[in-house]
Each structure stands twice: as C-alpha cells, then as structure tokens.
Image: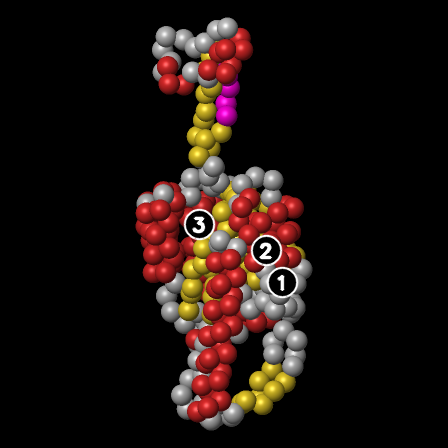
Amino acid sequence: MLPRELISQVKKIEIKTRKTVNEITAGAYHSVFKGRGIEFDEVREYTEDDDVRDIDWNVTARTGAAHIKKYIEERELNVILAVDASSSTAYGSSDKSKAMRAVEMGALLAFSAIRNHDKVGLLFFTDKTEFYLPPKSGRLHGMRVIRELLAREHSGGKTNIASAMSSLMRLLKKHSVIFLMSDLLDEKDFSRTMRSAGKKHDLIAIRILDPAEKNIPHGIPDLILEDSEDGGICEFRASSPSRAKDFREKSELIHAQNKALCAKAQVDIIDIDSSEDFIKPLLKFFRMRERKH
C-alpha cells in the first residue's frame, strides 16, 4: 500500500469512528476502565485539616505521633491491542475479512484510549510475536497504531495464543487492559496462560468469526478446501445435507470449546460476526461491565 493511500485510509477510519468514540468515552469506557484505582503517595504527620478516617494507626503506634497515608488516583491506563495475524484471519466470505474487522475494532479502541488520555500499544502475533509497539499516549502515537494496523500484511503462520500471552506478561511491567482480537482457532489449550495473564492484567477476548465458519450457506456446490494455516487440501461435499449438518455441528463444538477455555481462564469474551456491525456487541459488553462495577 502506498503511503498516500495509507494516510487516506487512516483519515477515513478516524472520521468513521469519531462519533462512536465520543459515545464510548463519554460513559462506558471511562466508567469501566479506571486503572488500578489508587496508588500510594506518602505518609505524613496528621494535621487538623486532615480527615481522622485517614489516620494510619500502625504508623501512629510505631512513631508515637498521628500519621496518615495519602493516596492519589491512578488515572492513566495501558491499553494493549493483541491482534491475531495468522493466516486464518485473512478469510472473509463477505466484503470484510476477519482481519479487517480487527483493524476497525482496533482503531476504535485505540482512539477511545487516546481520547481518555490513556496509553495504547499494539502486538501482532501468529505462533510467534510478529511486531510489538510499546504503549504511549498522544494523538500522534494513536495514529501510528492505526497505520500499523492497516499496513500489516499477513505473513502466514498458525495461531498460538499462549505464546502471545506469555510475551505480553514479559513485556508489560504495569497493569494493563489487553484486548485479544482473534478467531481463537488455536489447536493448543490456551486457558492456563490466559488465566495467568488475566490475573495480572484485565484481559478481554474479542472473538471474530466469519458466518461461513459456523454454517455452510444453502446452495453452495461441492468444494475443494485449503487450510490457510497448514496448506492441507480436502474435498467437501457442501451440497450434501448430511455433510452440511456435520460441518455445523463440528463447528459449534469447536467454538463452544474455545469459549469454554475462556470461561476456564475467567476471561470475558465478546463475540463478533465479521459480516455484521461490531458496535452493538462492544457497547453491550461495556455496559455489562459498567453494571458490575
């Protein structure tokens, strides 16, 4: 993609998401993601202007003079977009691939973070870390994140969510909000590593699936299918009602198992259909989280 075309796409995404960003940052995002709450500032002697409820009785007993602990609210967050760049995310049966939906959602979340004066970072992963941009604040950095999202080309490779989570736990020294954007089509059990990451950080899985991955459309002829990640070839009799039923049932089982892995890891999941608008399920999730808080 030429730089001029890339800049044009960045601007289009910014304009397209501006209204939604305003809606999100006006309420749900700010209410849900507040960082760690408060952090310790200092211990000092009590004065008559202080609230007696702030007295630290342990320090007071130890020193013989009334002392209080003061805290400050920790406002700035680290927001990390962990984006699956494996071959399977390039698939799309409609005008939008799973990868393009991830770009649009990533842009919306990045602008929301910047608008809320948070830091935002980016990780692309397959079965290894493909690219990492450390979190920073500011509009220019936010635009850099969007450019990287748009410019990234799929380099092939399989999905390894456990590896991506392990990398983030090494890279991130501060509590962060991690949005994992993936189809979750990973042959390995990622629940243990996700659980560890979820204990240290606020981890949210955004599962992006194409409708054709869940149900073979009616009237599709027999197909020759290629696995986008390992190159395997198979014939599929899509015109056979029994085969179509088998496909649907196996697909439901795989996606249910992946959702169960997230539940086992105690990680919230947002399901996104790549052919539909993603704003409603995202806002629904934010408002659900807001009620919990």
Magenta stretch in the rendered image = 40-44
Q: Which residue is mark 1?
A: 160
Q: Which residue is mark 3?
A: 111
Q: Residue at x 34, y 56 (%)?
A: 284
State which mark lies toward you, 3 or 1: 1
Crowdedness of circle 1 by 10 Å Cα count: few (<14), some, many (20+)? many
Expressed as whole percent of the image width and height from the top left, the position of residue 44 reads 49, 13
Q: CA separation, marks 3 and 2? A: 31 Å
Label 2 close to label 1 by CB (< 8 Å)? no
Q: CA separation, marks 2 and 1? A: 13 Å
- Closer to us: 176 or 67: 67
Q: Earlier in the sequence, mark 2 or mark 1?
A: 1
Callout 3: helix, strand or loop? helix
Callout 2: helix, strand or loop? helix
Instruction: Assign the C terminus to one quadrant of the image.
Output: top left
Q: Residue at x 46, y 87 (%)?
A: 244
Q: Which residue is mark 2?
A: 192
Left/right of residue 8 with respect to residue 28 in the rendered view: right
What is the residue that sits farthest to the top in this orientation?
A: 64
Q: Amino acid at mark 3?
A: Phe
Left/right of residue 215 with respect to residue 171 in the rendered view: left
Expressed as whole percent of the image width and height from the top left, the position of residue 162 reads 62, 58
Expressed as whole percent of the image width and height from the top left, the position of residue 276 reads 38, 69
Q: Amino acid at mark 2?
A: Arg
Q: Residue at x 55, y 44 (%)?
A: 200
Count numbered badges in the picture. Answer: 3
The overriding secondary structure of the stretch rendered in magenta is strand
Callout 1: helix, strand or loop? loop
Q: Earlier in the sequence, mark 3 or mark 1?
A: 3
Q: Residue at x 49, y 74 (%)?
A: 253
